[in-house]
Image (spheres, rainbow, N blue to C red):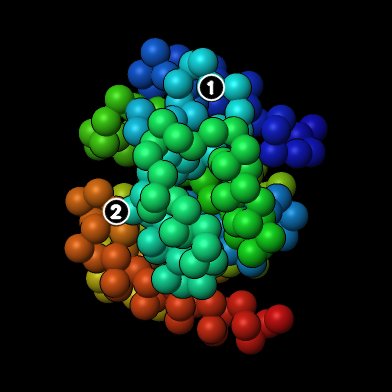
Amino acid sequence: MILKISDLKAEYDRMQKKYGAKELDSIYNGGCEENPDICFIFMNPTGRNIASNKSWVGRKSPWLGTKNIWKLFYNVNLLSIETYNKIQEKKPKNWDYKFCDYVYNEIENNKIFITNLGKCTQIDARPLSDEVLKKYLDLLFKEIDIIKPKVIITFGNQVSSIILNKKISVSENRKIYHEIEINKNKYKVYPVYYPVGNGIFNIDKSIEDIKWIIDNEIKVVT
């Protein structure tokens, strides 16, 4: 019986060998693992994450050594200006184990959890097929069942459609939630524009929608 997030790592590592770049490690997740306010689900990691290097022995959490995504978390008040500025000033190679833990300790304290649907790290931001991403769905649902978030935010049409098992266009579902049931627990899922990479031009819409979700789902409840 799986009781904690770390129990999933061995399976992610096995699947990395099958679906990811052989020279890179799988990237797992990070943040608050006990009833986070929000679980953010992205697509899949790339080799730009410094933790994907096989010599890296620190945490293997999303977006380590990158800059753009932290602008999103700062603008929705889930990352302090101090931490955001430190991230912007650092070159990827200067993210050491201590700084990575510092960033994710703040993420944890802000009661959010960050993960990817696919944990298979690719060399670059090449698109993954629905077929490969669907291989990770059962493990993602186990992740969700373990942490039991109040709200789930899925980024982009592809990830949202696979998780909700129906065709989703984010542009037609802004600030609209759908429900999934995992192990007899129901969760609200909000599709949101993918905010980085090819979706960087949509980051302002992502920020707007996430702020709305926080105001209407998290602040109201708490």
Q: Nearer the viewer, residue 184 or 207?
A: 207
Name which residue type carries label 2: Val
Using residue 10 as the reference point, say whether residue 119 is left or right of it: left
Name which residue type carries label 1: Trp
Count of numbered badges drawn on the protein: 2
Q: How far across and how far down the image is residue 156, in percent?
A: 32, 56
Above or below residue 132? Residue 216 is below
Above or below residue 89? Residue 190 is below
Above or below residue 150? Residue 87 is above
Using residue 54 as the reference point, say whether residue 107 is left or right of it: right
At x 55%, y 26%, the residue is 12
**Which quarter of the picture shows residue 23?**
top left
Q: How far across and how far down the image is residue 219, in percent?
A: 62, 83
Disc 1 to disc 2, how far (Cα)? Answer: 24 Å
Q: What residue sits right under mark 1 in the picture?
A: 56
In what quadrant of the picture does the N terminus appear?
A: top right
At x 49%, y 29%, the residue is 51
At x 45%, y 35%, the residue is 94
Using residue 199 as the reference point, say whether residue 136 is left or right of it: right
Q: Nearer the viewer, residue 173 or 4?
A: 4
At x 39%, y 36%, the residue is 92
Inspect this view and state whether residue 182 appears. no
In what element is the residue under mark 1? loop
User: Residue 196, which numbered label?
Assistant: 2
Inspect this view and state whether residue 171 appears. yes
Label 2 environment density (alpha carbons within 10 Å; few <14, some 14–19, many ≥20): some
Label 1 environment density (alpha carbons within 10 Å; few <14, some 14–19, many ≥20): few
In what element is the residue under mark 2? loop
Using residue 36 as the reference point, say whether residue 46 is left or right of it: left
Q: How far across and how far down the image is residue 26, in percent?
A: 49, 26
Above or below residue 24? Residue 65 is below
User: Residue 152, which numbered label?
Assistant: none
